Image (spheres, helix red, strand yellow):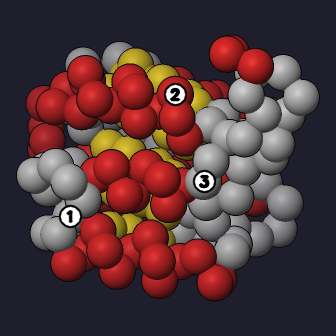
Amino acid sequence: MILLAILEDDERRQETMKRLLADAFPMAEIVLFDNAPDMVAWLTERLADVDLLCLDHDLVFTPARAGGRSDPGTGQDVVDFLVTRPASQPVVVHTSNWGAVAGMVGPLEQAGWQVWRVIPFADLKWLQTAWLPAIREILRQRGGAELAVAPDAAHT
């Protein structure tokens, strides 16, 4: 079983990510978060179980969230949490916010985390042409043959 935790607030991206990952890794469990506080709370209990983390930076404010809060935080909030824990899982940072990249990638790398940077482009096309290949490579390196990876199912 592969467990992937993803911070992404865009519903179209979420749906595409779920579809691509389900095709490529049929046995994967995918946990999606649209806000940093919920992801950090979940990671507090489940970080050791996670095989890969994917983080966006900018998240959209919403009028109604659990507890009456509207601030979703940012991917930086998750990074701030991760650097207080022993480095273990690879992290993919997928934000187009160039100003935020160094603040996310730098502290993670300094704390010993393996970080991959994927640059969004061409609406959703980058998910299949850049993001998914990075995910495949990371998981291949981490688990080799034991990760029931479907051969290029997402490239059809």
Residue found farthest to the front: 68
Dot 2 and dot 3 residues touching (CB under 8 Å): no
List the residue tagged with mark 1: 113
Residue at image location 32% in from the left, 43% down from the top: 52
Q: Front-most of 24 and 127? A: 127
List the residue tagged with mark 2: 38
Dot 3 and dot 1 residues touching (CB under 8 Å): no
Q: Residue 129 placed where, x, y %?
A: 62, 62
Which of label 2 and label 1 is nearer to you?
Answer: 2
124 on left or right of 6: right
11 on left or right of 102: right
Q: Front-most of 45 and 54? A: 45
Q: Amino acid at mark 2?
A: Asp
Sequence order check, earlier mark of 2 and 3: 2
151 on left or right of 65: left
Residue at image location 20% in from the left, 64% down from the top: 113
Q: Quadrant of the N terminus?
A: top left
Label 3 Cα crowd, 10 Å radius (few <14 / some 14-19 / many 20+) = many
Spatial separation of the CA atoms under disc 2 and disc 3 = 11 Å
Residue found farthest to the right: 63
Q: Residue 116 placed where, x, y %?
A: 38, 69
User: For the residue labelled by badge 1, is the local secondary structure a helix, a strand or a loop?
Assistant: loop
List the residue tagged with mark 3: 74
User: For the residue labelled by badge 3, is the local secondary structure a helix, a strand or a loop?
Assistant: loop
User: For the residue labelled by badge 2, is the local secondary structure a helix, a strand or a loop?
Assistant: helix
Q: Residue 133 placed where, x, y %?
A: 46, 58
Sequence order check, earlier mark of 2 and 1: 2
Vertical side of 133 occupied by 122: above or below? below
Q: Amino acid at mark 1?
A: Trp
Q: Front-most of 10 and 131? A: 10
Q: Amino acid at mark 3?
A: Thr
Label 2 Cα crowd, 10 Å radius (few <14 / some 14-19 / many 20+) = some
